[in-house]
Amino acid sequence: MKLARVLMVSLIVLGGGFLSSRTVVADSSSPYCAYFAETKHNVHGAFLLYYNRRGDYLGLPLTEAFWEKGRVVQYFERARLEFVPENPSPHRVEIGMLGLEYYPDKTDPPIRLPPPLNDPNFAYFQESGQVTSFAFKDYFDKQGGREVFGYPISWVRYEREANKFVQYFQRQRLLWDPLAPEGRQVTSTPLGKLALEKNYPADFKWRLPAPNDWCGTPPKIGPTPTTPPFVIPTPGISNLSLTLKVQVRFRQTGTTGPQYVDVIVEDQAGRRLADIAAYAVVHLADGPRYLPLLPTNSQGMATFGFEIGKQPPNCSVLVEVVAFSGPVSATGRDTFTCQ
């Protein structure tokens, strides 16, 4: 028997080259987005959630989120974040394989003799047949391990140009300087910055300074009906049919100022669905914006905000949301006219 479920998404839109430490100058208590004055870029939703865990490693944002090769991505000083909403939580944000992409010629054959499994100074990865050890292993473990770096893909080598010992990983290149002060002997490459500069010109739209999205607390829209959360059961076979119905209500519309959107995900019985991944595409007169959203909460809701910018009078703004439940997805959309 075919298992079919209907998801309803209601959108309520209201008007309204260095490696440094991160500084959030927007409302730091906002769960929706944050603005970084140093580079003049916003970090939204699922990316902000990940950044709050790994921001000390990632560095500052160098772009807004944008569409690249079928994914919503965002470049940071040391990495590229990718939104993979079809993955189960908490694996919906991944660090891109920039080590493999930027250094495709740096891989080495697997080592011939793996180290003893009980030696704490070594970590052997059967997937790549490589080992990371000593100072490289300590840094690897402290900064997030496989999640952040992937597997090692090379031996340790000395590179004259860098004047350091180097090891390559799927997502990063690590450098070791034994003469550096304790705690600073191993460093990571600003690979996000290098890959961005290699692939996109300086005037690429999403590299340019962006306005502050001001994702503080959105204005109240009245009480929200509460219903018990409902989680889609895992079927024996992947045979789900999803349909999104989108309703958009603008409390205030205009050609400038922040807009807020509440996304409500329900099934065909009106029951709210928790932990649903989604991204939004806001089609403006000067082009689309891509926003990775937070997963829906226990009440089946996710909220995001964005600065609409200076739009021409009577422009048409399309708000589109794509929601995911595992490998299947559905889309809802609606428009409003700037006044």
Image (spheres, rainbow, N blue to C red):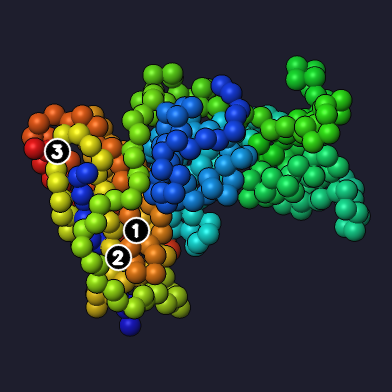
Is residue 71 visible in this depiction of the protein? no
Task: Look at the image and tell me in which quarter the C terminus lies.
Answer: top left
Measured in 3D between alpha carbons, the distance from the residue under mark 3 to the one under mark 1, in whole angstroms, is: 23 Å
Q: In this view, does 316 lie to the left or right of 143?
A: left
SS category of the residue bearing label 3: loop
SS category of the residue bearing label 2: strand
Tag 2 residue: 265
Report the mark closest to the observer, 3 or 1: 3
Q: In this view, does 165 lie to the left or right of 6?
A: right
Whichever of labels 1 and 2 marks the residue nearer the N terminus, that label is 2
Tag 3 residue: 254
Query: Which mark is drawn over residue 288?
Result: none
Q: Which amino acid does label 2 sit on?
A: Val
Asked if marks 1 and 2 touch (Cβ < 8 Å), the reply is yes
Residue 80: % across, % down: 53, 38
Whichever of labels 3 and 1 marks the residue nearer the N terminus, that label is 3
Report the mark closest to the observer, 3 or 2: 3
Residue 288: % across, % down: 28, 37
Query: Which mark is drawn over residue 302?
Result: 1
Is residue 313 visible in this depiction of the protein? yes
Which residue is at a point 20% across and 45% down the rendered structure image? 15
